[in-house]
Image (cartoon, rainbow, N blue to C red):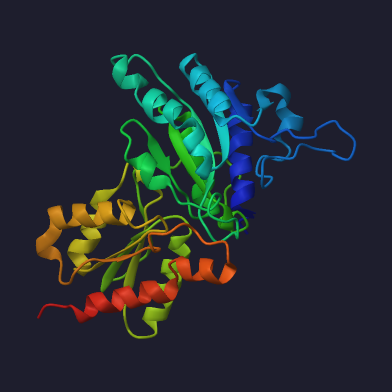
Amino acid sequence: MARKLSIRQAINEAIDQEMSRDPRVIMMGEDIVGGHGSEGEIDCWGGALGVTKGLYGKYGDRLLDTPLSESAYVGAAIGAAVCGMRPIAELQFIDFMGVCFDQIYNQAAKFRYMFGGKAQTPVVIRAMIGAGFRAAAQHSQMLTPIFTHIPGLKVVCPSNPYDAKGLLIQAIRDNDPVIFGEHKVLYGIEGEVPEASYAIPFGEANIVRDGDDCTIVTYGMMVHRALEAAALLEKEGIDAEVIDLRTLSPLDMDTILESVERTGRLVCVDEASPRCNIATDISAQVVQAAFAALQAPIMMVTPPHVPVPFSPVLEDIYLPDSTKIAAAVRRTLEGKRH
Protein backbone atom coordinates (compact mmCIF):
# COMPACT_ATOMS: atom_id res chain seq x y z
CA MET A 1 0.00 0.00 0.00
CA ALA A 2 1.37 3.36 -0.99
CA ARG A 3 2.36 5.62 1.87
CA LYS A 4 0.59 8.90 2.53
CA LEU A 5 2.17 12.25 3.38
CA SER A 6 0.74 15.67 4.11
CA ILE A 7 1.65 18.59 1.87
CA ARG A 8 3.83 19.85 4.72
CA GLN A 9 5.72 16.55 4.80
CA ALA A 10 5.94 16.34 1.00
CA ILE A 11 7.56 19.78 0.78
CA ASN A 12 9.97 18.89 3.57
CA GLU A 13 10.93 15.66 1.80
CA ALA A 14 11.47 17.44 -1.52
CA ILE A 15 13.87 19.90 0.09
CA ASP A 16 15.59 17.11 2.03
CA GLN A 17 16.16 15.00 -1.08
CA GLU A 18 17.43 17.93 -3.15
CA MET A 19 19.77 19.15 -0.41
CA SER A 20 21.13 15.62 -0.14
CA ARG A 21 21.54 15.33 -3.92
CA ASP A 22 23.06 18.75 -4.63
CA PRO A 23 25.38 20.56 -2.16
CA ARG A 24 24.61 23.85 -3.92
CA VAL A 25 21.08 23.85 -2.51
CA ILE A 26 20.82 26.12 0.54
CA MET A 27 17.94 27.69 2.46
CA MET A 28 17.40 31.18 3.85
CA GLY A 29 14.48 32.37 5.93
CA GLU A 30 13.07 33.63 9.18
CA ASP A 31 12.95 31.06 12.01
CA ILE A 32 13.84 28.12 9.77
CA VAL A 33 16.52 27.33 12.37
CA GLY A 34 14.97 29.15 15.31
CA GLY A 35 16.00 27.93 18.74
CA HIS A 36 18.13 24.99 17.70
CA GLY A 37 20.64 24.23 20.43
CA SER A 38 18.97 26.38 23.07
CA GLU A 39 17.15 25.21 26.18
CA GLY A 40 13.57 24.15 25.52
CA GLU A 41 14.15 23.46 21.82
CA ILE A 42 15.39 20.06 20.68
CA ASP A 43 15.08 20.92 17.01
CA CYS A 44 14.75 23.86 14.70
CA TRP A 45 11.43 25.65 14.55
CA GLY A 46 11.11 25.03 10.81
CA GLY A 47 9.53 28.29 9.71
CA ALA A 48 6.19 29.83 10.68
CA LEU A 49 4.25 26.55 10.35
CA GLY A 50 7.06 24.04 10.79
CA VAL A 51 7.40 23.01 7.14
CA THR A 52 11.21 22.69 7.21
CA LYS A 53 11.45 21.22 10.71
CA GLY A 54 14.34 18.76 11.11
CA LEU A 55 16.43 19.87 8.16
CA TYR A 56 18.90 21.91 10.20
CA GLY A 57 19.91 18.78 12.09
CA LYS A 58 20.91 17.19 8.77
CA TYR A 59 22.41 20.09 6.87
CA GLY A 60 23.58 22.53 9.51
CA ASP A 61 24.77 25.89 8.19
CA ARG A 62 23.27 25.28 4.76
CA LEU A 63 20.10 26.53 6.47
CA LEU A 64 20.56 30.19 7.31
CA ASP A 65 18.35 31.93 9.84
CA THR A 66 17.89 35.52 8.70
CA PRO A 67 16.98 38.84 10.29
CA LEU A 68 13.43 40.14 9.85
CA SER A 69 14.39 41.77 6.57
CA GLU A 70 12.92 40.20 3.46
CA SER A 71 14.70 42.70 1.24
CA ALA A 72 18.04 41.54 2.67
CA TYR A 73 17.75 37.76 2.50
CA VAL A 74 15.69 37.52 -0.70
CA GLY A 75 18.26 39.79 -2.33
CA ALA A 76 21.06 37.63 -0.89
CA ALA A 77 19.40 34.48 -2.24
CA ILE A 78 19.10 36.01 -5.72
CA GLY A 79 22.75 37.07 -5.61
CA ALA A 80 23.81 33.59 -4.47
CA ALA A 81 21.85 32.06 -7.36
CA VAL A 82 23.66 34.23 -9.91
CA CYS A 83 26.95 33.09 -8.35
CA GLY A 84 26.25 29.36 -8.77
CA MET A 85 24.26 28.33 -5.72
CA ARG A 86 20.67 27.05 -5.82
CA PRO A 87 19.00 28.88 -2.92
CA ILE A 88 15.53 28.41 -1.51
CA ALA A 89 14.26 31.56 0.20
CA GLU A 90 11.25 31.22 2.50
CA LEU A 91 9.17 34.39 2.38
CA GLN A 92 6.75 33.07 5.03
CA PHE A 93 3.66 34.95 3.83
CA ILE A 94 3.35 36.11 0.23
CA ASP A 95 1.83 39.29 1.66
CA PHE A 96 5.37 40.37 2.61
CA MET A 97 6.57 40.39 -1.00
CA GLY A 98 6.12 44.16 -1.13
CA VAL A 99 9.25 44.52 1.01
CA CYS A 100 11.46 42.67 -1.50
CA PHE A 101 9.52 43.04 -4.76
CA ASP A 102 12.18 45.08 -6.54
CA GLN A 103 14.74 42.31 -6.05
CA ILE A 104 12.27 39.82 -7.57
CA TYR A 105 10.64 41.60 -10.50
CA ASN A 106 13.33 44.12 -11.44
CA GLN A 107 16.41 41.98 -10.84
CA ALA A 108 15.94 38.19 -10.71
CA ALA A 109 13.24 38.11 -13.38
CA LYS A 110 15.33 40.16 -15.83
CA PHE A 111 18.90 38.86 -15.45
CA ARG A 112 18.66 36.22 -18.18
CA TYR A 113 17.24 38.76 -20.65
CA MET A 114 19.51 41.68 -19.72
CA PHE A 115 22.68 39.59 -19.99
CA GLY A 116 21.85 37.99 -23.32
CA GLY A 117 20.96 34.57 -21.92
CA LYS A 118 24.33 34.17 -20.18
CA ALA A 119 23.02 34.66 -16.64
CA GLN A 120 21.02 32.05 -14.76
CA THR A 121 19.13 32.69 -11.53
CA PRO A 122 18.08 29.31 -10.07
CA VAL A 123 16.32 30.63 -6.97
CA VAL A 124 13.09 29.34 -5.44
CA ILE A 125 11.03 31.73 -3.33
CA ARG A 126 8.60 29.75 -1.20
CA ALA A 127 5.68 31.63 0.31
CA MET A 128 2.44 30.84 2.11
CA ILE A 129 -0.63 31.97 0.21
CA GLY A 130 -4.37 32.19 0.62
CA ALA A 131 -7.21 32.78 3.06
CA GLY A 132 -9.25 30.56 5.35
CA PHE A 133 -6.68 30.45 8.17
CA ARG A 134 -8.15 33.34 10.19
CA ALA A 135 -4.93 35.28 9.66
CA ALA A 136 -6.50 38.65 8.70
CA ALA A 137 -5.93 40.97 5.77
CA GLN A 138 -2.12 41.19 5.89
CA HIS A 139 -1.47 37.45 6.05
CA SER A 140 -4.21 35.94 3.86
CA GLN A 141 -3.90 37.26 0.34
CA MET A 142 -3.67 35.26 -2.88
CA LEU A 143 -1.15 37.44 -4.72
CA THR A 144 -0.01 34.84 -7.26
CA PRO A 145 -1.48 36.80 -10.23
CA ILE A 146 0.93 39.67 -9.54
CA PHE A 147 3.90 37.37 -10.18
CA THR A 148 2.38 35.84 -13.32
CA HIS A 149 2.32 39.34 -14.78
CA ILE A 150 6.13 39.49 -14.68
CA PRO A 151 8.06 37.99 -17.64
CA GLY A 152 10.97 35.86 -16.42
CA LEU A 153 9.26 34.45 -13.35
CA LYS A 154 7.74 30.99 -13.06
CA VAL A 155 4.79 30.62 -10.70
CA VAL A 156 3.73 27.32 -9.11
CA CYS A 157 0.79 26.49 -6.85
CA PRO A 158 0.22 22.80 -5.95
CA SER A 159 -3.07 21.50 -4.58
CA ASN A 160 -2.00 18.09 -3.23
CA PRO A 161 1.02 16.33 -1.68
CA TYR A 162 2.08 14.43 -4.82
CA ASP A 163 2.23 17.63 -6.88
CA ALA A 164 3.83 19.59 -4.03
CA LYS A 165 6.84 17.27 -3.92
CA GLY A 166 7.26 16.86 -7.68
CA LEU A 167 6.77 20.52 -8.50
CA LEU A 168 9.14 21.71 -5.76
CA ILE A 169 11.88 19.35 -6.96
CA GLN A 170 11.38 20.70 -10.47
CA ALA A 171 11.50 24.27 -9.11
CA ILE A 172 14.80 23.65 -7.28
CA ARG A 173 16.34 22.17 -10.42
CA ASP A 174 15.02 24.92 -12.70
CA ASN A 175 17.50 27.56 -13.86
CA ASP A 176 15.01 30.44 -13.63
CA PRO A 177 13.47 32.14 -10.57
CA VAL A 178 10.38 30.31 -9.31
CA ILE A 179 7.67 31.62 -6.99
CA PHE A 180 6.35 28.56 -5.15
CA GLY A 181 2.99 29.19 -3.48
CA GLU A 182 1.99 26.96 -0.56
CA HIS A 183 -1.62 27.32 0.58
CA LYS A 184 -1.50 27.40 4.35
CA VAL A 185 -4.92 25.74 4.70
CA LEU A 186 -3.74 22.74 2.67
CA TYR A 187 -0.59 21.87 4.66
CA GLY A 188 -2.38 19.06 6.49
CA ILE A 189 -4.03 17.51 3.40
CA GLU A 190 -2.74 13.96 2.90
CA GLY A 191 -2.22 11.94 -0.26
CA GLU A 192 -0.07 9.23 -1.78
CA VAL A 193 3.53 10.31 -2.39
CA PRO A 194 6.33 8.07 -3.72
CA GLU A 195 9.44 7.92 -1.57
CA ALA A 196 11.71 8.16 -4.62
CA SER A 197 12.63 11.53 -6.04
CA TYR A 198 10.60 12.73 -9.04
CA ALA A 199 9.98 16.00 -10.87
CA ILE A 200 6.74 17.25 -12.46
CA PRO A 201 7.35 19.43 -15.55
CA PHE A 202 6.03 22.98 -15.46
CA GLY A 203 3.24 24.02 -17.80
CA GLU A 204 1.28 20.77 -17.65
CA ALA A 205 -2.16 21.09 -16.09
CA ASN A 206 -3.82 18.04 -14.57
CA ILE A 207 -7.39 16.97 -15.35
CA VAL A 208 -8.44 15.78 -11.89
CA ARG A 209 -12.00 14.96 -12.93
CA ASP A 210 -13.30 14.10 -16.38
CA GLY A 211 -16.60 15.56 -17.57
CA ASP A 212 -18.53 16.53 -20.69
CA ASP A 213 -20.96 19.27 -19.63
CA CYS A 214 -18.75 22.11 -18.36
CA THR A 215 -15.06 22.84 -17.73
CA ILE A 216 -14.00 24.17 -14.32
CA VAL A 217 -10.48 25.61 -14.24
CA THR A 218 -8.73 26.52 -10.99
CA TYR A 219 -5.67 25.96 -8.76
CA GLY A 220 -4.59 25.61 -5.14
CA MET A 221 -7.27 25.24 -2.48
CA MET A 222 -9.99 25.98 -5.03
CA VAL A 223 -9.29 22.62 -6.70
CA HIS A 224 -10.84 20.96 -3.65
CA ARG A 225 -13.83 23.31 -3.68
CA ALA A 226 -14.29 22.63 -7.42
CA LEU A 227 -14.26 18.87 -6.86
CA GLU A 228 -16.86 19.28 -4.11
CA ALA A 229 -18.99 21.31 -6.53
CA ALA A 230 -18.63 18.63 -9.20
CA ALA A 231 -19.84 16.01 -6.71
CA LEU A 232 -22.91 18.14 -5.95
CA LEU A 233 -23.63 18.62 -9.65
CA GLU A 234 -23.26 14.92 -10.38
CA LYS A 235 -26.33 14.26 -8.24
CA GLU A 236 -28.25 16.52 -10.64
CA GLY A 237 -26.97 14.71 -13.71
CA ILE A 238 -24.42 17.41 -14.55
CA ASP A 239 -20.96 16.11 -15.49
CA ALA A 240 -18.28 18.77 -14.80
CA GLU A 241 -14.62 18.47 -15.78
CA VAL A 242 -12.13 19.92 -13.28
CA ILE A 243 -8.68 21.13 -14.36
CA ASP A 244 -5.93 21.79 -11.81
CA LEU A 245 -3.54 24.31 -13.39
CA ARG A 246 -0.62 23.40 -11.06
CA THR A 247 1.55 26.11 -12.64
CA LEU A 248 0.27 29.61 -13.42
CA SER A 249 3.34 30.61 -15.40
CA PRO A 250 3.89 28.80 -17.70
CA LEU A 251 0.15 28.31 -18.20
CA ASP A 252 -1.17 25.22 -19.98
CA MET A 253 -3.73 26.84 -22.29
CA ASP A 254 -3.70 23.84 -24.63
CA THR A 255 -5.35 21.58 -22.04
CA ILE A 256 -7.90 24.28 -21.18
CA LEU A 257 -8.81 24.93 -24.81
CA GLU A 258 -9.13 21.25 -25.64
CA SER A 259 -11.53 20.82 -22.74
CA VAL A 260 -13.61 23.92 -23.54
CA GLU A 261 -13.88 22.97 -27.21
CA ARG A 262 -15.39 19.67 -26.06
CA THR A 263 -17.69 20.90 -23.25
CA GLY A 264 -18.61 24.29 -24.72
CA ARG A 265 -18.76 25.88 -21.27
CA LEU A 266 -16.20 27.34 -18.88
CA VAL A 267 -16.18 28.33 -15.20
CA CYS A 268 -12.94 29.93 -13.94
CA VAL A 269 -12.43 29.83 -10.18
CA ASP A 270 -9.79 31.98 -8.49
CA GLU A 271 -9.24 32.82 -4.83
CA ALA A 272 -7.39 35.98 -5.85
CA SER A 273 -9.05 39.39 -5.95
CA PRO A 274 -11.25 39.62 -9.07
CA ARG A 275 -9.46 42.39 -10.96
CA CYS A 276 -6.73 41.11 -13.33
CA ASN A 277 -6.48 37.67 -11.75
CA ILE A 278 -5.94 34.19 -13.24
CA ALA A 279 -9.66 33.75 -13.94
CA THR A 280 -9.83 36.95 -16.00
CA ASP A 281 -6.65 36.02 -17.88
CA ILE A 282 -7.89 32.56 -18.82
CA SER A 283 -11.35 33.86 -19.73
CA ALA A 284 -9.85 36.41 -22.11
CA GLN A 285 -7.57 33.86 -23.75
CA VAL A 286 -10.43 31.39 -24.24
CA VAL A 287 -12.63 34.05 -25.82
CA GLN A 288 -9.81 35.01 -28.16
CA ALA A 289 -8.87 31.45 -29.15
CA ALA A 290 -12.09 29.43 -28.87
CA PHE A 291 -15.06 31.81 -28.94
CA ALA A 292 -16.88 29.73 -31.55
CA ALA A 293 -16.80 26.70 -29.25
CA LEU A 294 -18.54 28.47 -26.35
CA GLN A 295 -22.18 27.52 -25.88
CA ALA A 296 -22.72 29.93 -22.97
CA PRO A 297 -21.05 32.96 -21.39
CA ILE A 298 -17.94 32.23 -19.31
CA MET A 299 -18.55 32.42 -15.57
CA MET A 300 -15.93 33.58 -13.05
CA VAL A 301 -16.11 32.70 -9.35
CA THR A 302 -13.90 34.92 -7.20
CA PRO A 303 -13.97 36.77 -3.89
CA PRO A 304 -15.28 40.35 -3.82
CA HIS A 305 -12.80 43.17 -4.43
CA VAL A 306 -12.16 43.84 -0.73
CA PRO A 307 -9.40 42.96 1.77
CA VAL A 308 -9.64 39.51 3.36
CA PRO A 309 -11.82 39.84 6.49
CA PHE A 310 -10.60 38.66 9.89
CA SER A 311 -14.07 37.72 11.12
CA PRO A 312 -14.51 33.97 10.60
CA VAL A 313 -18.09 34.45 9.40
CA LEU A 314 -17.09 37.13 6.89
CA GLU A 315 -14.00 35.21 5.73
CA ASP A 316 -16.15 32.18 4.95
CA ILE A 317 -18.52 34.37 2.93
CA TYR A 318 -15.58 36.05 1.20
CA LEU A 319 -14.09 32.81 -0.15
CA PRO A 320 -15.47 30.95 -3.18
CA ASP A 321 -17.01 27.64 -2.12
CA SER A 322 -18.61 24.59 -3.69
CA THR A 323 -22.09 26.14 -3.61
CA LYS A 324 -20.98 29.24 -5.52
CA ILE A 325 -19.03 27.16 -8.05
CA ALA A 326 -21.96 24.79 -8.62
CA ALA A 327 -24.28 27.76 -9.12
CA ALA A 328 -21.93 29.18 -11.77
CA VAL A 329 -21.89 25.86 -13.63
CA ARG A 330 -25.71 25.78 -13.60
CA ARG A 331 -25.79 29.27 -15.10
CA THR A 332 -23.65 28.15 -18.03
CA LEU A 333 -26.15 25.36 -18.69
CA GLU A 334 -29.07 27.77 -18.50
CA GLY A 335 -27.33 29.86 -21.17
CA LYS A 336 -27.06 26.92 -23.55
CA ARG A 337 -27.60 27.81 -27.21
CA HIS A 338 -29.91 25.45 -29.13
Q: Nearer the viewer, residue 62 or 22?
A: 62
Viewer can see residue 59 = yes
Does 135 sit above or below residue 57? Answer: below
Does 163 sit above or below residue 329? Answer: above
- Side (left or right) of 143 relative to 7: left
Identify the residue shown where x is 43% and y is 73%: 322
Return the x and y of residue 246 as percentages of the image width and height. Answer: 41, 50
Question: Which of the image's four quarters has the N terminus?
Answer: bottom right
- Side (left or right) of 44 relative to 232: right
Viewer can see residue 201 = no
Q: Nearer the viewer, residue 44 or 34?
A: 34
Identify the residue shown where x is 23% and y is 57%: 283
Return the x and y of residue 20 as percentages of the image width and height. Answer: 63, 28
Return the x and y of residue 80 as percentages of the image width and height. Answer: 53, 18
Question: Which of the image's four quarters has the C terminus?
Answer: bottom left
Identify the residue shown where x is 37% and y is 63%: 302
Q: Which residue is at the far right? A: 39
Return the x and y of residue 71 as percentages of the image width and height. Answer: 53, 27
Does 122 sit above or below residue 310? Answer: above
| Quadrant in the picture for residue 111 | top left
